[in-house]
Image (tube, rainbow, N blue to C red):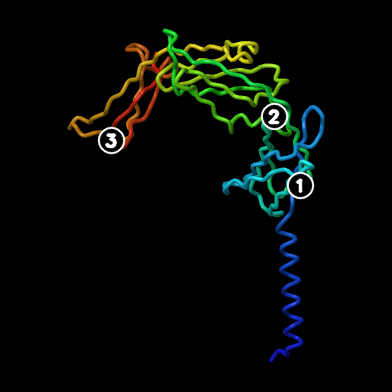
Amino acid sequence: MMSAKLLKVAWRAIGAGVLMASSVLVSALELRLLDGMTGQPLKDATVVWRLGTNEAGTLSADANGRVEISLPATGSNPVRIIGRKQGYAPMTMSWEARNAPVRFDLVLPEAQHMGGRAMDESGGPVVGAEVRLILPQRLSGPWVAVDDLPLKSDSEGRWGCDWVPKNAAYVYVEVSHPDYLSSDGGVTLEALRAGTAEQKLFSAATVRGRVFDEGGEPVPGATVVLGSEDGLWPGADTSETRGDAAGFFEFRRIR
């Protein structure tokens, strides 16, 4: 039978082992958010971070622009951070958790407002159009978190944002809507900065149908090819889709 003294020593050993395991499994990533022009810390900047598919966490930077994130030191899941502050472009960076640095400076460039309007052929507004901005991005290191900031046109077809870096050499604009052919490019930086950039979307047809067999029963998952009568061969200008479980199919945005 183990004596009280030996039992106490054993529990101390177990406790020490748990502490050692904790120190191995958890590490800290210290972020410092800085002004891209002055290099000064950005107090009260926001950091949104996510480990793998876990729920995102939000932290606020202190007076020195610092936040600290606890990470599993041996994890293979990616950790992604996004730094934000009003008046600055949001920047993002990611690593595998086990390869994350102990300290990292995330520099936020000053931002500018840009906007425009999505119109149909007659000049009327296109409501609910998705707008995607393509900006210059670095080949490595932090990049502008464009994909985390979706844009849509309002009831007047207008859209706007205040997070485009001031030093962006170009901004390429893609506008899309399920009922129209997509529009891209064709606007100047000056028009975008003035909020007067206009892009026309042209109406497109939608072809819907259902596939039946000879007995009148729906054919699930049938492959349907759309093209000209004399042009349905491999490599021709055709579109292809697959019907659903009830045999219904749909082609959208047909010229």
Q: Nearer the viewer, residue 212 or 42?
A: 42
- Give the residue at the far top of this rendering: 122
Image quarter of residue 65: top right
Residue 88: mark in rendering: 2
* Mark nearer the N terminus (2 vs 1): 1
In the displayed structure, 165 sits above or below 54; it is above
At 69% from the left edge and 31% from the top edge, which residue is drawn? 143
Q: Nearer the viewer, residue 117 or 246?
A: 117
Of discs 3 and 1, which sits in the foreground? 1
User: Distance from label 3 to label 1 (Cα)?
Assistant: 54 Å
At 76% from the left edge and 33% from the top edge, which residue is drawn? 107
Q: Position of residue 75 (x, y in %)?
A: 67, 52
Q: Amino acid at mark 1?
A: Glu
For label 3, the residue is 246
Q: Are marks 3 and 1 in contact (CB under 8 Å)?
A: no
Q: Amino acid at mark 3?
A: Ala
Image quarter of residue 196: top right
> In the figure, is residue 181 to the left or right of 51?
left
Q: Secondary structure at mark 3?
A: loop
Q: Are marks 3 and 2 in contact (CB under 8 Å)?
A: no
* Mark nearer the N terminus (3 vs 2): 2
Residue 229: mark in rendering: none
Q: Secondary structure at mark 1?
A: strand
Of discs 3 and 2, which sits in the foreground? 2
Residue 30: mark in rendering: 1
Q: Quadrant of the C terminus?
A: top left
Q: Secondary structure at mark 2?
A: loop
Crowding at dot 1, Cα within 10 Å, few <14 / some 14-19 / many 20+, comes out as: some
